[in-house]
Image (cartoon, rainbow, N blue to C red):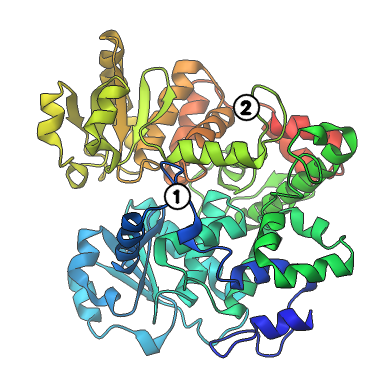
Amino acid sequence: APLLSHKMGNSSGGFEGRMPNEEDLPFLQVLNDKRCLDWRNSPDSETGKSLSAEDERRMKREQGCLPVHISSNVFLSDARSAQKIGRLKHLGIAFVLNVAGKAVEPPNLDEYHNQGIEYKMLDASKETRVLDSYLAEAREYIAMAREQQRNVLVYCKNGYDLSGLFVASEKMLLEGRKVLETVAECRRLRGNDFLKIGVYQENLIGLARKTGLLGMESERFMTLPKQEQASFAFDPVKARSVLTGETFGRPSSMGTTRSHSSAGSQGSMNSDITNSFSSSVKSMFNSMGSSMGSLKILPAKKAKITNEEDKIYVVVLRDPLCLNWRNRPDPETGEALTLDEQDKISKDQKNLPVHMCESVYIGSTRAINRVGRLKHLGITHVLNLAGPDAVPSSMTSLTEAGIVYKMIATEKDQHTALEKHLAEVRAFIARAREGDGSCLLYCKTGSDISALFVAAEKMLCEGTHLLATVAQCRRLRGNAFLQNESFQEQLLVLARQHNLLDRCAEHFLNILLGDKIGHAEDMPLLVQ
């Protein structure tokens, strides 16, 4: 511990003589060691191969081309780039969040106003418990931008540290990723200087612990003999392998078989996951104004859902753990996913377009220009749901390939998109099916407005219930799928109209919030 304290205290803003939580030390160790989360040591997210020298040069250029896209609707930059209004407009950024206070306030605030860009300032630079004081306010601002299908820029002086803490927190909670995986991905997008200040790392790890996104491996780590724990101070790469589950997260303590399906180890894992769900859902209920004891849902201050029963589904859809695909067993074997299986699924989710249901694929504006891949997948129809801003640059190539293109401008109908356009979308998909083809639905990210219509089509086509549909879609496309709250509510209304609400939801939450919490035998019902 003294060695770690010395290593992680630093002149650029370390722990200032404070001793971190002992259980957090392994994670802080991994975050601070330059080798552990170095993006250059990670394989290409699409091919799975090691990065070439050319790939590294390209990614380094992209990391420095600010603002950088970090997660759904969220960009990150330094104070200087926040003043480049032309670039902000080009990226669809209509909301700017300064988290470092007056010191980095842009001189051209009037220009923001003239260009229709909203601006908000949080003076979080003098706080040590940053997230406790400001995260809720920052996430509310981001959610406002997301609901309007606009992008938000979060910035501080250098675009690495304080703003890095906020965007990493949003990404972790939105996508349900574990903390080390979140930081590794952010460093791939922004560079290895991302979130290097110790006090901000502590904040993020504390949030991960509260929301069940730290990982169960840390508790097992603390049960090791002190001498073995100390060895990790000299080998952070080994520490990373433990904390990400490559050792303790495997089915057996050191192997790769599925022997953890025995009652003892499986029960321990189930209890951990159940308690994580419980903590996270309780937090969500508190934010919605719920009475925990009786499950009587009280009207939330800003809730758009008025039906009391529907609020149960809203909680489950918005909780970062309930429908997290990583927590769900393999649909064929019923076993918990190994890390190798999780890695494979994660790569498949990013290899757009992704097949979602019969004759239907989902993609992004980037994927639409891969005409060769579209032909390989048998895609004959393409539907742009994001309007003129997402028109493909490969329009000529689409026409030459015989692919039918259609655009439905939904950007002005964000709160009534399903009601106004579902029939037209389904008719276009039906035409593709009639011709033995497939239809690609896309928007800018492949996770927002296109996700709403894909989920609606899958739910109606297959007759699956609401929560099961979204859970399956997140397994196929990732946990960022359908995080827009307005879109969630529209899908919920559609499910109720077609009698496709999961009637066990109230019982599901009674288990989460009642006396049965922590009992391993309840896990199959939670998963179901």
**Image coords of residue 146 (percent x, y):** 39, 54
Looking at the rendering, which quadrant does residue 475 occupy? top right
User: In the drawing, what numbered circle is on residue 307?
Assistant: none
Q: Which quadrant holds residue 76? A: bottom left
Closer to the observer: label 1 or label 2? 1
The outermost residue toward the front is 53
Q: Looking at the image, is 492 positioned above or below residue 79?
A: above
Whether 320 is drawn above or below 333: the answer is: below
How far apart are labels 1 and 2 at the CA level? Answer: 43 Å
Q: Position of residue 36 (x, y in %)?
A: 58, 64
Q: Nearer the viewer, residue 103 or 187?
A: 187
Q: Mark 1 or mark 2, which has the lower sequence index?
A: 1
Q: Amino acid at mark 1?
A: Ser
Q: Residue at x 37, y 36 (%)?
A: 352
Residue placed under numbered mark 2 in the picture: 502
Q: Judge by depth and name the residue closer to the eye, 341 or 464.
A: 341
Compared to residue 28, the image places residue 463 above or below, namely above
Q: Which residue is mark 1?
A: 50
- Left or right position of 132 against 82: right
Marks 1,2: beta carbons within 8 A? no
Q: Position of residue 11 (x, y in %)?
A: 56, 91
Image spot of residue 50 (x, y percent): 45, 50
Few, some or many C-alpha atoms within 10 Å of disc 2 (few <14, some 14-19, many ≥20)?
some
Residue drawn at (52%, 17%) of the image: 463
Indicate the quadrant containing the C terminus: top left, top right, bottom left or bottom right.
top right
Position of the N terminus by quadrant: bottom right
In terms of depth relative to the viewer, which is nearer, 333 or 59?
A: 59
**Label 1 element class:** loop
Residue 423 is at least partly visible in this image: no
